[in-house]
Image (cartoon, rainbow, N blue to C red):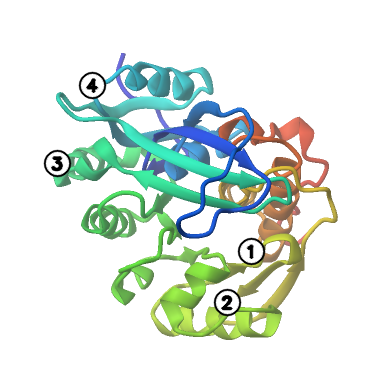
Amino acid sequence: MGPRVAQLVVVGSVNMDLTMPLAHLPQSGQTLLGGDTRWGPGGKGANQAVAAARLGVDVAFVGAVGSDHFATTLRQALTDEGVDVSQLIDLKEKASGLALILSTAGGESTILVSPGANGQLSPDQIDALAGLGFLGASILACQLEIPHPIAELAMIKARQAGLKVFLDPSPAEGVAAKLVGRADLVTPNRVEATALTGIAVTDFASAGAAGKKLLALGAGAAVVKLGHEGSVLVSARLVETIPAHQVTTVDATAAGDAFSGGLVAATLQGADLVEACRYATAVAAVAVTRPGAMTSLPHRSEVTAKPVHRGA
């Protein structure tokens, strides 16, 4: 069976996540005893694909897995969520992506990623995707756990094909300004925004300044995420503070991915950027109240807020 029509195409990473709960994050050279570890599918690309799918979006995923025993589990996890995996390739003699997540009870997390097959995505995959008309999608979502030249090629070809391009610039180390300029919407957290702009993002005011710098680099709009405080949306016509929902955070690992899925779902339903950010905030608020990455992502029925259409 061939690929089906999609609303969203995600070009990104898929990993097996190993999550270890800790009382606090370790210092250099320190040995800590943690709680029971959890294994499960993840990766920023796969998480965002599943986040959008659970919110009712038709999603296709473009990526790679290895030839190890994780590969079948990762592919099946996406398939079970209704994600089209016709463009997910298997690479012989490569390991699938692996992430080690150190998570505290207060919601802090540190993530270490071994890209594996994710680092082997090729221009041929992007050319094939473009040849398929991006499967009919209207939005492309990229993250940076894949080679930057592949993300950039996908973004260029998507823009040429008339798609909106959403970029989650994570991880932000070594990201060229021209990559930011390929995005209609860029969504860094405070650490990533600081790395991209050189502005120390500590509050709403500095987040707004960083957002303006991202627009100066060529992004169409920017959302700078401040975790439990909320986010700041910056576009050519406005700077809007989006407050976070007050919830008890259990695990913030996939909060940003839930937010990205919410942005896509709301945009596809006709919401403007402000309302899309408010809906994305509501989606992320549900995700952080539950442990795990992909397992924490909510279904549409669990999100009480609804996207507001333009003109509503």
Mark 1 vs mark 2, CA separation in Å: 9 Å
Q: Earlier in the sequence, mark 1 or mark 2?
A: 2
Mark 1–mark 4 CB contact (< 8 Å): no
Mark 1–mark 2 CB contact (< 8 Å): yes
Q: Earlier in the sequence, mark 4 or mark 3?
A: 4
Mark 2–mark 3 CB contact (< 8 Å): no
Residue named by callout 3: 124
Q: Amino acid at mark 3?
A: Asp
Secondary element at image label 2: loop
Where is the C terminus found, in terms of image quarters? bottom right
Residue named by callout 1: 273
The residue that appears at 70% across and 79% down in the rendered structure is 204
Residue 114, image x and y in percent?
A: 33, 43
User: Which is nearer the eye, 114 or 206?
Assistant: 114
Secondary element at image label 3: helix
The residue that appears at 30% across and 69% down in the rendered structure is 174
Residue 258 visible in the picture: no
- Left or right of 279: which side holds 253? left
Q: Earlier in the sequence, mark 1 or mark 3?
A: 3
Q: Could you classify mark 1 by the number of other residues whose Cα lies within 10 Å: few (under 14), some (14-19), or many (20 or more)?
A: many
Secondary element at image label 1: helix
In this rendering, is residue 90 above or below 166? above
